[in-house]
Image: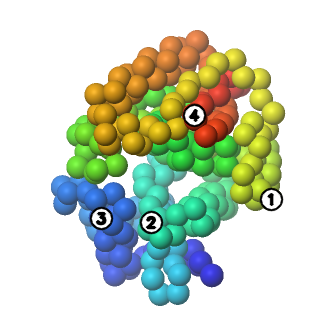
């Protein structure tokens, strides 16, 4: 059974650092160092680890933030070892983050994700109930991670309004089904931004084509957000993954 618990010691932070290297393949310069974990832990952030027995198989790291509307948490990292992916570990970590944030009276968590990664987009939007209203061009500069494939680090910003009925309903619905309804809750969709399902292979084998796709969807996102639309759903088929856009109050 997987157990999620708060991390607080340098030994535990060191385990998370090693897991970073395993999951992302970062060069040393791109690793989040031990002191940052300690700072997050002591300043209102979140550092949680997922354990299978004595082995850390995943972790998440979040920092406190402040907006004009009030405080929130920015979830900077969530990593799961390859052998434990698609087994619910990431969901357990996100649920622990949500529970902790709600207990402190917070109602918003944010994080960034690569819009070209269909599996992550589906998890964030369809299974957690996050929305997206911002697209960041090359947010982190050049990355040493092979997962970025040498492309600019464009990112979508996921907004997880953890106290809203939308999120509660989505979590309850997806807990009952590993393959949740693609448009749950029912939405008013006005536009779609589509990716080919083999985008990971395209990024690896055809980098110029991958960059063209990245530029194209970036333009679509910027245009859609400029018109007041937000990503409110995500669906995937054997041939494509599609961001569903509509009005968000």
Q: Earlier in the sequence, mark 2 or mark 3?
A: 3
Between circles 2 and 1, the one closer to the viewer is 2
What residue is shown with label 2? Answer: 82
Between circles 4 and 3, the one closer to the viewer is 4
Instruction: Please state which of residues 73 and 29 is positioned toward the viewer in this rendering.
Output: 29
The crowding category of the residue bearing disc 1, from other C-alpha atoms within 10 Å (few below 14, some 14 to 19, many at least 20), is few
How far apart are the two marked residues, 2 and 4, measured between alpha carbons? 23 Å
Q: Is residue 240 above or below residue 190?
A: below
Between circles 2 and 4, the one closer to the viewer is 4
What residue is shown with label 4? Answer: 240
How far apart are the two marked residues, 3 and 1, measured between alpha carbons? 33 Å
> Which residue is rendered at x = 28% and y = 50% of the image?
146
- Asked if one can make out residue 100 in the rendered structure from this viewpoint, the answer is no
The disc label shown at residue 21, or none: 3
Q: Is residue 170 above or below residue 82?
A: above
Please, what secondary structure does the residue beneath circle 4 have?
strand
Q: Earlier in the sequence, mark 2 or mark 1?
A: 2
> Which residue is rendered at x = 60% and y = 67% of the image?
87
What residue is shown with label 1? Answer: 176
Residue 66 x, y percent position in the rendering: 49, 42
Between circles 2 and 3, the one closer to the viewer is 2
Q: Quadrant of the N terminus?
A: bottom right
Q: Earlier in the sequence, mark 2 or mark 4?
A: 2
Instruction: Please state which of residues 82 and 44 is positioned toward the viewer in this rendering.
Output: 82
Residue 116 x, y percent position in the rendering: 45, 37
How far apart are the two marked residues, 4 and 3, measured between alpha carbons? 30 Å
- Asked if one can make out residue 214 in the rendered structure from this viewpoint, the answer is yes
Q: Earlier in the sequence, mark 1 or mark 4?
A: 1
Residue at the far bottom in the pictured view: 54
């Amino acid at each position: 059974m997987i157990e999620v618990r708060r991390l607080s010691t340098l030994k535990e932070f060191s385990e998370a650092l090693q897991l970073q290297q395993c999951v992302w393949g970062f060069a040393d310069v791109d690793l989040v160092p031990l002191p940052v974990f300690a700072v997050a832990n002591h300043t209102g952030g979140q550092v949680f680890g997922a354990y299978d027995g004595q082995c850390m198989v995943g972790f998440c790291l979040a920092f406190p933030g402040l907006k004009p509307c009030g405080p929130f948490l920015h979830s900077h990292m969530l990593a799961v070892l390859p052998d434990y992916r698609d087994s619910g570990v990431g969901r357990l970590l996100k649920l622990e983050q949500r529970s902790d944030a709600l207990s402190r009276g917070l109602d918003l968590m944010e994080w960034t994700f690569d819009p070209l990664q269909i599996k992550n987009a589906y998890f964030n939007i369809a299974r957690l109930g996050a929305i997206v209203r911002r697209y960041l061009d090359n947010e982190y500069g050049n990355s040493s991670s092979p997962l970025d494939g040498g492309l600019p680090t464009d990112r979508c910003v996921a907004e997880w309004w953890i106290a809203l009925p939308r999120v509660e309903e989505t979590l309850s619905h997806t807990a009952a089904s590993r393959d949740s309804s693609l448009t749950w809750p029912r939405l008013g969709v006005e536009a779609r931004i589509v990716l080919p399902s083999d985008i990971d292979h395209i990024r690896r084998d055809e980098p110029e084509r991958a960059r063209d796709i990245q530029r194209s969807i970036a333009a679509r996102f910027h245009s859609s957000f400029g018109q007041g639309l937000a990503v409110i759903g995500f669906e995937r088929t054997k041939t494509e993954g599609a961001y569903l856009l509509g009005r968000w109050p």
